[in-house]
Image (tube, rainbow, N blue to C red):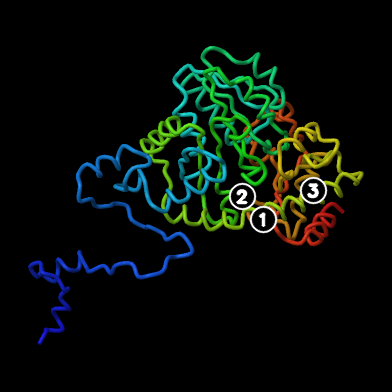
Amino acid sequence: MTDPAAGQQPTTTQTPRALGTRTVHPPRPAAAAGRPLSQPIYQASVFAHDDPTTLTDSLDNPRGAYGYSRMANPTVRALEAAAADLEGAELAVATASGMGAIHAVLGSLLSAGGHVVIQESIYGGTTGLFDDMAARWNIEFTAVPGDDPAAVRAALRADTAAVYLETISNPMTAIADIAGIAEVTRGSAAKLVVDNTFASPMGCRPLQLGADVVIHSATKYLGGHDDVTAGIACYADAELGSAAWKFAVATGSTLDPFAAWLVLRGMATLALRMRAAGATAAELADRLRQRDDVLAVHHPSLAGHPQHRLATEQLNGFGPMLAFDLADADAAQQLIGRLQLIQNAPSMGGVETVAMHPASTSHRHYSPRALAAAGIAPGTVRISTGIEEVEDIWTDLRAALG
């Protein structure tokens, strides 16, 4: 009779192993019939191989076997495949944050003393990275309007490595002329990089308009639930993407499996959330523009928006983010302080509606002159709409306005 203290021996022809060894190598049942409807989480950092050559391949190939999860992981690769599919990319690289994706893209493109053409009025965190690169690596940045291909052409130099745009700029909702600027960069050494976070693939697919690289802060609309930090870069050219993968692996910015799973779960409802939140943003913009205490409203759905026509041609919907200007910073801060349903929080893209004061948060390191150049007034308020009922959001906003 088997000694219960010794445990059940596995049914095998191999030499029986000691109990301590069997705690490290327990029997693992084969997968039963049936397949999971959701992507499993492979919470493993190391993968074993029978063939030594496949292990070598796993360390050098972004599409190779799995060996070490800093290089590749099944759950992370599932996210990369899903994002590449939505954007029409050849290869995607997932990172630990949106800034990680931007750093991987630019770090793999730039050398010390290089040059980048950037769109005016973009995310403050991005310009903060650019300022650091300028000081640390002597990278030069030339800012131009994102809707002016001629200005981009004039700014290009022989050493220009990239042109950097935002589909919808943060926070002023300026629309970049991606197709027009792609015509300018085509044939040059400069790669067209587009941050598509605010539009998401539901609103725009920049690779189809001629971009070389698309970036997402997956923390925002792709994840969609304020419970994950992640980024992803999608490449039209797999070789270019492989260079970014190598940079991300070397700098340790790759994504962990559970975070990848959270983004995948969020992406399942992306179309529904973007449709609902975008409709709410357009409705709020229309109501806000009719108020005397609101000096200006910034949302591409409005006929008076500077790039309204471009937005109708390039976007599928106008996005869930809007901004509006009050008299001054005090008015903006007082409004935010009176909100009850709408939360005062950084970031955006979750199911909750959030508001913030860009001049004192996302763009706090801007000088008054830089804020004015970006179109950000002292009284500018940014709102990212969630999926609450529009009348509840408007009731809260109207009461806070007074």
Amino acid on which disc 2 is placed: Tyr
Position of residue 358 measured from the top left corner of the image (x, y, whole percent): 69, 40
Position of residue 241 measured from the top left corner of the image (x, y, whole percent): 45, 34
Q: Nearer the viewer, residue 231 or 369?
A: 231
Q: Which mark is residue 273?
A: 1
* Label 2: element kind: loop
Task: Please say if 62 is above or below 8.
Answer: above
* Label 3: element kind: helix
Q: Which mark is residue 221?
A: 2
Query: Decide: marks 3, 1 in contact (CB < 8 A)?
Result: no
Gap in angstroms between the C-alphas marked 1 and 2: 8 Å
Gap in angstroms between the C-alphas marked 3 and 1: 14 Å
* Label 1: element kind: helix
Outermost left residue: 15
Dot 3 or dot 1: first in sequence order is 1
Dot 1 or dot 2: first in sequence order is 2
Residue drawn at 70 percent across, 24 percent down? 145
Outermost bottom residue: 1
Dot 2 or dot 3: first in sequence order is 2
Q: Which mark is residue 281?
A: none
Q: Which mark is residue 282?
A: 3
Gap in angstroms between the C-alphas marked 2 and 3: 17 Å
